[in-house]
Image (spheres, grey):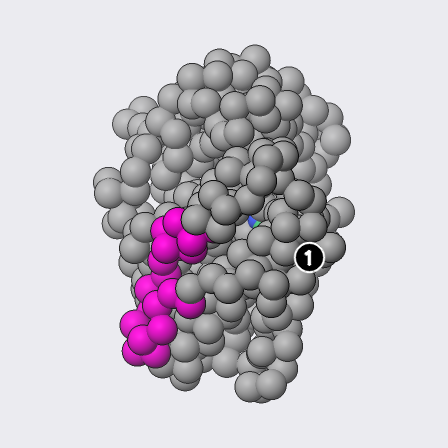
């Protein structure tokens, strides 16, 4: 069964073709980074306008790479939410129009559900033997930092979430504060390699062991206070040290709470997903901590961590098999996840 996936929830216009819910035949991502870089973050209206320009070429390219025509595709899956609503609308309307014109079913998919099940994908970006169910999944992106118990495809229980910012957003804000290029996580990771994390003292948030919650706003404020004491232009060694310390603090919190969640659920399998899971230091720290505790770690290949449409096609396949793609006329976009909560059971 061939599924065409479409993803436009933020600043990547993406289309992919996935066979059997796992094997990625094409994975096209058109990045808008150069458009938003000068603003230090995503400008929603610019993003939706550029999705409009890029979406059909992306779909065409994905089909061409897969060697298929739309007539040969069995169904479509599209990110329905959460995300920037103007951006989501471009993907949803495109998917509905293509499905209508070609007489195909189309299913709306939750973006976070795509992230936490992307570990099942295998393709040019990499392949991991997927975990058995249940597993504990960390979804750490620009909009989310949440932990889920994944009991089966479509069956999730939320274990923890952030009280304020998302981890990726915290990296992006630090980068903006330091005048580093967008997207921030990549810039902070690059500079952190040259820094000494112990050179700056940052607070250790959420120390209560029994509370599976994240918080990043205190870290952000602490970083701002450190920068306020610096001369301008900011000396490079200080910038590198602060990036290293900040990254270490974020990684330490993500590791600590994820392991606590796995322990509370007596679940020995951990999956890392979302854009922040592309971070090399995060991957190394998790590998070390999981090895120490006898837990098995599943690292989503980096190309399937950041936003992509293969993860949407992958989970969409599961719902299309259940016949959920028929009668799609009502399919709509949702900027926040409320109306979608019943979709992937237990997802928020
Ligand atoms: O999953 P994603 O591509 O989009 C959302 O769903 O938000 O995640 C994007 C986020 C951005 O905040 C970006 O700064 C962060 O992931 N990110 C990273 C790295 N690569 C991307 N954060 C830390 N280290 C990285 N290498
Ligand atoms: Zn995402």
**Is residue 258 shown left or right of residue 239?**
left
Q: How many numbered badges does the structure rendering display?
A: 1
Q: Which residue is mark 1?
A: 195
Identify the residue at image location x=50%, y=46%: 229
* Residue 206 in picture, x, y percent from top left: 35, 68
Q: Helix, strand or loop at disc 1?
A: loop
Give the answer, above or below, for where 13 lies relative to 216.
above
* Residue 347 in picture, x, y percent from top left: 33, 54
Identify the residue at image location x=50%, y=80%: 268
Give the answer, above or below, for where 293 lies relative to 132.
below
Give the answer, above or below, for where 48 lies relative to 104.
above
Identify the residue at image location x=69%, y=24%: 61
User: Is label 1's Cβ within 8 Å of ligand 1?
Assistant: no
* Residue 238 in picture, x, y percent from top left: 63, 50
Give 206 or 94, whichever is nearer the viewer: 206
Residue 206 sits inside the magenta stretch: yes
Residue 56 sits inside the magenta stretch: no
Q: Is residue 27 visible?
A: yes
Give 277 or 149, whichever is nearer the viewer: 277
Give the answer, above or below, for where 40 lies relative to 323.
above
- State the extent of the magenta-drawn residues as a range: 204-223
**Is residue 204 shown left or right of residue 299?**
left
Q: Is residue 122 visible?
A: no
Q: Quadrant of the N terminus?
A: top right
Q: Could you classify mark 1 by the number of other residues whose Cα lies within 10 Å: few (under 14), some (14-19), or many (20 or more)?
A: some
Give 74 or 273, whichever is nearer the viewer: 273
Identify the residue at image location x=45%, y=32%: 9
């Amino acid at each position: 069964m061939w599924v065409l996936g479409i993803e436009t929830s933020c600043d990547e216009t993406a289309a992919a073709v996935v066979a059997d819910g796992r094997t990625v035949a094409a994975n096209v991502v058109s990045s808008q980074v150069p458009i938003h870089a000068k603003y230090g973050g995503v400008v929603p209206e610019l993003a939706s306008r550029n999705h409009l320009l890029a979406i059909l070429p992306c779909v065409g390219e994905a089909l061409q790479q897969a060697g298929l025509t739309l007539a040969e595709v069995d169904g479509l899956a599209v990110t329905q939410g959460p995300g920037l609503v103007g951006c989501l609308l471009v993907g949803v309307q495109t998917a509905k129009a293509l499905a209508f014109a070609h007489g195909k079913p189309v299913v709306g998919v939750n973006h976070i559900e795509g992230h936490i099940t992307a570990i099942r994908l295998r393709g040019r970006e990499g392949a991991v033997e997927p975990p058995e169910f249940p597993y504990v999944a960390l979804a750490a992106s620009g909009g989310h930092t949440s932990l889920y118990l994944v009991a089966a495809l479509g069956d999730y229980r939320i274990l923890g979430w952030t009280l304020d910012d998302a981890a990726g957003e915290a990296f992006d804000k630090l980068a903006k504060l330091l005048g580093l290029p967008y997207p921030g996580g990549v810039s902070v990771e690059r500079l952190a390699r040259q820094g000494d994390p112990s050179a700056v003292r940052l607070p250790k948030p959420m120390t209560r062991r029994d509370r599976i919650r994240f918080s990043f706003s205190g870290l952000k404020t602490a970083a701002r206070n450190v920068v306020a004491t610096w001369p301008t232009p900011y000396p490079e060694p200080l910038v590198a040290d602060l990036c290293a310390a900040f990254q270490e603090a974020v990684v330490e919190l993500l590791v600590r709470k994820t392991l606590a969640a796995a322990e509370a659920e007596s679940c020995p399998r951990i999956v890392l997903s979302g854009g922040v899971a592309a971070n090399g230091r995060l991957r190394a720290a998790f590998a070390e901590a999981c090895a120490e505790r006898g837990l098995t770690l599943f690292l989503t290949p980096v190309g399937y961590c950041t936003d992509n449409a293969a993860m949407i096609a992958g989970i969409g396949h599961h719902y299309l098999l259940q016949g959920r793609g028929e009668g799609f006329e009502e399919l709509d976009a949702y900027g926040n996840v409320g109306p979608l909560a019943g979709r992937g059971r237990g997802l928020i």
